[in-house]
Amino acid sequence: MSFSTEIKEEISILKFSYLEDLTFLSAFTRNNGTKTDKEIILTNENLKVIRKIFSLFKELFDISPTITQIGKTKFGSKAIYQLHINSKIKEILTKLMIYDEENNYLDQPKPYFVDQEDLKRAYLRGIFIATGSVNDPKTSSYHLEFFIDNIIEANFVSKLLKYFIIPSKIIKKDKGYMLYIKESEKISDFLRVISASRAVMYFEDIRIYRDHKNMTNRLNNCEQANIDKTLQTAQNQINDIDYLIENTDIDSLPQKLKEIIIYRKKYPESSYQELSEIISYETGTKLTKSGLNHRLKKIKELVNNLKNNS
């Protein structure tokens, strides 16, 4: 079972108020199937969802729609179910704010239809069940989307999401518009908005694990990069020291520089911190990282001068 299916089935068993159910049913019906003045046909591949919609029509409009199975998805893995409604069509489409009293199609519900926060949540639940999907957080990317037929409805849903501080983007597709969310935190927020509590806990557990794993990998990569940089720096310093030994009289150098030459050759892989601590311990004279760096720079200057004068 896909993560999207689990969410839709979780939502399908929840109980809400009359107005929330009406708003939920409005979103589902508006964004699903076909609607005429003689029949409403709603389609879904999840039988539990179809049964939920059936029960809502029965409770809200006192009708008993017909459920049929029309075949399977193009991959043949799931059946496709349809809900047929042949009575009270005008009353249903009017109460669901899909048509007005004069039987004119409404591009979007009137503002008062979703003027309360719980009704906004209900509408988002309905459209998610009708046309939404979300990647399992275990996959390589976070992605939640709705496929919506027209731009007016897509913008309406985007505004509802914006109310809950969930930014979304809309792109044109061949047969409609895709509204999508990519940020993991905002996807989690959306699941909270539609009351999918179990899905939120699952999503957050996986998200936290992935974030921790990614942070660990970044730290490991950073640590390895630092190690590589330390080794390369040390090797460059040893190359300078070798050049200096071959081209000058080391005994003529100041004692502090001769000391650095001896210890850098002896501990070629040590970092500045490690090398300064070793020298301090073995010589009994405190040497800071800054002091070590200063002496190594002096060695570098001597090498550059020798090369320039050669």
Image (cartoon, rainbow, N blue to C red):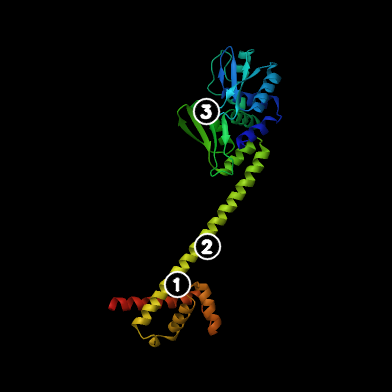
Front position in the image: 64 or 19: 64
Rendered residue at 55%/56% (across/down) = 217
Q: Earlier in the sequence, mark 1 or mark 2?
A: 2
Above or below, 174 against 217 in this view is above
Front position in the image: 183 or 47: 47
Q: Which residue is mark 3?
A: 148
Mark 2 Cα within 10 Å, few/some/many (few <14, many 20+)?
A: few
Q: Earlier in the sequence, mark 3 or mark 1?
A: 3
Amino acid of disc 3: Ile
Report the residue that reaches farthest toward the front. Answer: 76
Q: Which residue is mark 2?
A: 223
Front position in the image: 276 or 230: 230
Cα distance between the residues tagged 3 and 1: 60 Å
Mark 1 Cα within 10 Å, few/some/many (few <14, many 20+)?
A: many
Amino acid of disc 2: Glu
Amino acid of disc 1: Ala
Rendered residue at 65%/26% (across/down) = 47
Label annotation for residue 234: 1
Q: Which quadrant does the N terminus fall into? A: top right
Q: Position of residue 285 (x, y in %)?
A: 53, 83
